[in-house]
Image (spheres, rainbow, N blue to C red):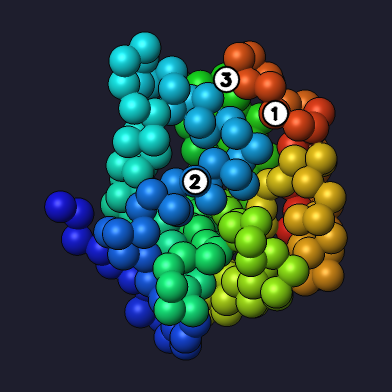
Amino acid sequence: MTQIRSDPSVALAPPLRPFRQEDADTVARLNDMASGGILLTVWKRLAGTNGDPWEHGRLQQFEQIESGWNIVVLDQGSGVEAVMMGQPHGAEPASLEGVDAEWVPLMELENLVPEAWCLNVIATLPAYRGLGHGARLMAQAQSMARAGGHSRIALVVSDASTPAIRLYERSGLREMARRPMFKGDWEGPGQDWVLMVKSL
């Protein structure tokens, strides 16, 4: 099984902790919620008629850690309530060759902010919303970005995700650019992906 690593540059104080193997199912569901269902659409495509799309989701969490993502969960003792996922970007833009069409506009936006710390996911289970989990994880993401020497933090969000946009604006992020969504066989909410950025 994948060795779970955590970023040593920023200490995590309870209720925050690093991702563990047993978190994969809940984190996959949170990741899909944050994507507006686009991930489940892709996982269903990968699984085919008889496969389990959620198994693809669970495995993807370990693949993301292997590729350099940081995954921090909020756990007050009874399991994952919320998650934050992010990664530093390199100086060179990511190649779009072979990328599924749904992801192209998101990657085009992320390529506008080389060397930023990219916040890929902040999501809270419905039962725990309104408790400040998103703000706590947003602050953690900014601490990790600063500790890594990044001069800005960036994220991409659906224009339909009004509560998330309000959280990001309260944290100091501002819209920099947007791209139309590619829907394909995905029927998620929104029309545009919005790039939001904050200088640190």
Q: Residues within 10 Å of mark 3 (few under 14, many from 20)?
A: few
Instruction: Say which of 53 and 19 sits in front.
Output: 53
Residue assigned mark 1: 188
Q: Residue 80 location in percent, x, y?
A: 46, 65
Q: Is residue 143 left or right of residue 171?
A: left
Q: Residue 104 location in percent, x, y?
A: 60, 27
Residue assigned mark 2: 29
Residue 58 visible in the displayed image: yes
Is there a contact, CB below 8 Å, between mark 2 and mark 1? no
Please report the residue visible at 64 percent of the width from the left and 77 percent of the height from the top. 136
User: What amino acid is found at the position of numbered circle 2 in the picture?
Assistant: Arg
Task: Indicate whether 118 appears above or below 135.
Answer: above
Instruction: Say which of 3 and 37 sits in front.
Output: 37
Q: Is residue 114 left or right of residue 99?
A: right
* Residue positioned most to the left: 1
Describe the element under mark 3 as helix, strand or loop: helix
Q: Residue 142 location in percent, x, y?
A: 62, 73
Task: Indicate whether 72 appears above or below 46.
Answer: below
Q: Residue 32 location in percent, x, y?
A: 54, 41
